[in-house]
Image: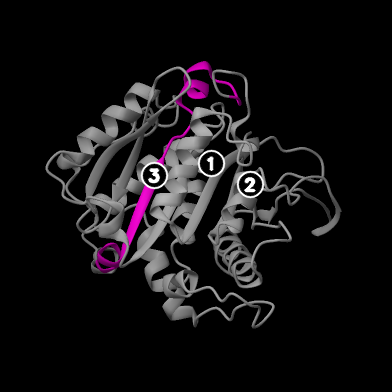
Amino acid sequence: MQRRTTLLALVAGLATAIPMGAAAAAPSAPESPRPTPPSAPAATTLGDALTDAGAARGSAAATPRTPFETSNGAQWSTFEQWQGFWRALDADNDRVRITEVGRSGQDRPIDLIAIGAPAPRSQSAAANGSVILYNCSIHGDEPSGREACMTFGRDLATSRDARVERFLRQTTVLFVNINPDGWIADTRQNGANVDVNRDFLELATSEGRVLATLIRDWQPDVLNDLHEYAPREFYDAQATTLWPRNRNVDDGVHALGKSMVLDYTGARIVAAGMTNAIYGHLNKEGRPFRQVAGDGQARILRNYSGLRHIVGQLTEAACR
């Protein structure tokens, strides 16, 4: 379990390593099938700082640890512990701001955690820079994304690495757990037995409406949607990733999303000694031979993000 959370923390950091100026200024018409990634030094300097769990973090006494960390991977954090963790991190830390942005169907709070240097007090305060949104757990029975958000957010908020500080002066990083009812019940669906990740056209759920409102108001440049999947024959990489594939997504946004997945996230996962594959593709002897998931439905958050001109990424960690 520890390795799975480490993997998601790596992916979380790498989603921020794509050139944010390019993401914010995605062209309205196609200019090339794939954007050219920056040179290796430019791409890895910030990426190394963001994905290094010990990147000049603040003192141990002042840094909260998750129950997953303190139990050495023996237990996941509870919803109440999630709330307490962020409030402990927020104490006397001007990089962190917590705002209740809505309520779940069963009237639990949905908090938005904003991290910057300093944390913006409003959407308008973040408008002059870039915004990244992490959807930590839309399915309540997929916990590792939540753990990755907690540790990665903590490391951003407490790092004294000059590269991270410079990054946070220009970029706001948002974290949200949109399905607390599913978390409490340990179910994929919300409290009304609806899969919120199939609700981004109808917006029939409280949770879907809250997330759609966040996207509308904050206008993130990059969105990383964190999940888990059950490995099986021909489909057993430690992580699978995918970009928005709805055919109505702007060509420039589509190209940037594909580049983020292939040139940054996937490549860095492999470089870290782990395995990565394209979500929904069965592989035999290292080559895909059948697609079984990952279509272009607009009601799914991955595709909805692209339709809202966001460079989106789905990240699925293997649940072993």
Label 2 Cα neighbours within 10 Å, binned few <14 / some 14-19 / many ≥20: many
Q: Is residue 88 left or right of residue 145?
A: left
- Up the image or down, 112 lies above or below 81; here it is below
Q: Amino acid at mark 3?
A: Phe
The residue wearing badge 1 is 4
The residue wearing badge 3 is 175
Label 3 secondary element: strand
Q: Amino acid at mark 1?
A: Arg
Q: Are marks 2 and 3 in contact (CB under 8 Å)?
A: no
Question: Does the magenta run of residues contain 90?
Answer: no
The residue wearing badge 2 is 238
Where does residue 90 sit, x and y in percent of width and height? 20, 40
Magenta range is 166-189
Comparing 71 with 130, the one in front is 130
Report the quarter where the C terminus lies. Answer: top right
Q: Is residue 273 visible?
A: no
Tell me which label, 2 or 1, sits earlier in the chain.
1
Q: CA distance from mark 2 to mark 3?
A: 23 Å
Where does residue 276 sit, x and y in percent of width and height? 65, 55
Q: Which residue is located at x 56 percent, y 26 percent?
A: 141
Tell me which label, 2 or 3, sits earlier in the chain.
3
Q: Are marks 2 and 1 in contact (CB under 8 Å)?
A: yes
Q: CA distance from mark 1 to mark 3?
A: 19 Å
Q: Which residue is located at x 33 percent, y 25 percent?
A: 81
Tell me which label, 1 or 3, sits earlier in the chain.
1
